[in-house]
Image (cartoon, helix red, strand yellow):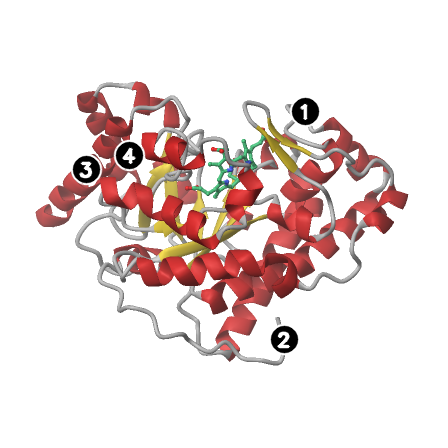
Amino acid sequence: MDKDLLIVPKDFPELKNDTFLRAARCEEVEHVPVWCMRQAGRYLPEFRESRAGKDFFETCRSPEACCELTLQPLRRFPFDASIIFSDILVVPQALGMDVQMCPGKGPIFPEPLKEPEDLQRLRPKVDVDAELGYVFKAITLTRHKLEGKVPLLGFTGAPWTLMSYMIEGGGSTTHSKAKRWLYRYPEASHKLLKQLTDVIVEYLLGQVTAGAQALQVFESHTGCLGPAEFKEFSLPYLRDIARRVKDKLKESGLENVPMIVFAKDGHYGLEELSESHYDVVGLDWTVDPRSARERTGGKVSLQGNMDPCALYATKERISEIVKKMVEGFGTRGYIANLGHGVYPDMDPEAVGAFVDAVHTHSRQLLNRK
Ligand code: 1CP
């Protein structure tokens, strides 16, 4: 992307439901907005059918396929937001790494980074438009095809989470190979985190230029860091991303693109996250809604956080759990979501029950006021 170019708004259909955007700005709403992480996913039979026999990253590179997969959950449920179908691992690919998605196993990097010299294998300067233009095309197409029904979110993985995949070579429970770098090669770790940050900033700005109306940054691997490592290797980069993206958006008159940070299992950093230039802090289910509110002191909107496994409960039980959650967070400055993504074996009807329960209970609470 040409850094000197200001972002020019494209001619998109008018937004009909801005509840999500208003909640992100802590403005008044008629109901609490709701969406689900992994709302486009294998729990939907139509998703499994569309994806059958196709390579995951080839699907990611097809704007038409990404658009279709993004729209599928909205045809079933009255979600208040959509999220572009893609993956966080397209960024390591843009840096020159080979990443494959093995069905049933997850992502595999055949040649992960092992030692600091391996950083030389990464592209020193990434042409974000050339490498990730397919995501921008998918966003623009989807924004048109959404017909203004709900806002479209763009997203990225955060630097530490991406770094950990690039060193582990795939999913991991301990992240010990990546953490080895933090303790043994702190300088090289910062170099890599900085390099990822620079690409991520351009990538997010490119997504807004393409039509994304909000941005979520996934720091999915916060849980394996202690508070000191979080403060050194995750938080400064999360902050830098939000500050740089916001500054650039402001220059273009686009202050109204909310940014969400979701640092999974990073509850020890809740206070810092609420003061890190993001509009919304996403929460996993291990945080109590009332205490999250107290600890963030009304500075930000909150998003989350029902345990995804509660979707295995009956509809009646889901409704009770949602009622408590909405009462706990309150209806102002709140976006309902799960504390992590929907699992593939979950019943779509349970997702529908979750969405309905958020709308029903929040309307009742708001009407009582
Ligand atoms: O074919 C398939 O269904 C593979 C499953 C799948 C899907 C549906 C993967 C592989 N990625 C995705 C899409 C995806 N990934 C989306 C868009 C869809 C939506 O949310 O509706 C998003 C936002 C992501 C983000 C993502 N990818 C994260 C951050 C969120 C989180 O889960 O913490 C992470 C960590 C990934 C990596 C990834 N991609 C896929 C898998 C199985 C994994 C996890 C690997 C692991 O660590 O074990």
Q: CA distance from mark 4 to mark 1?
A: 31 Å
Q: Earlier in the sequence, mark 3 or mark 2?
A: 2
Of labels 2 and 4, the one closer to you? 2
Q: Which residue is mark 1?
A: 174
- Label 1: element kind: loop
Q: Secondary structure at mark 4?
A: helix
Task: Give the distance between the C-alpha atoms of the residues marked 2 and 1, in whole angstroms.
Answer: 38 Å
Within 10 angstroms of label 4, few (less than 14), some, or many (20 or more) residues? many
Q: Amino acid at mark 2?
A: Lys
In 3D space, how far apart are the residues under numbered discs 2 and 4 (Cα atoms)?
42 Å
355 to the left or right of 303: left
Which residue is identified by label 4? Answer: 325
Residue visible at 52% across and 55% down? 275
Q: Identify residue for label 3.
A: 356
Which amino acid type corresponds to the residue marked 3 in the rendered image?
Answer: Asp
Q: Give me the residue at 71% from left, 35% from top.
A: 109
Q: What x and y, as percent, mark residue 26?
A: 32, 58
Quarter of image, res 258: bottom left
Q: Is residue 213 visible?
A: no
The reply, left or right, for residue 346 in relation to residue 322 is right
**142 vs 356, nearest the viewer:** 142
Task: Answer few, some or many: residues within 10 Å of disc 2's Cα (few below 14, many 20 plus, some between 14 and 19).
Answer: few
Q: Is residue 198 visible?
A: yes
Give the CA separation, mark 3 to mark 2.
43 Å
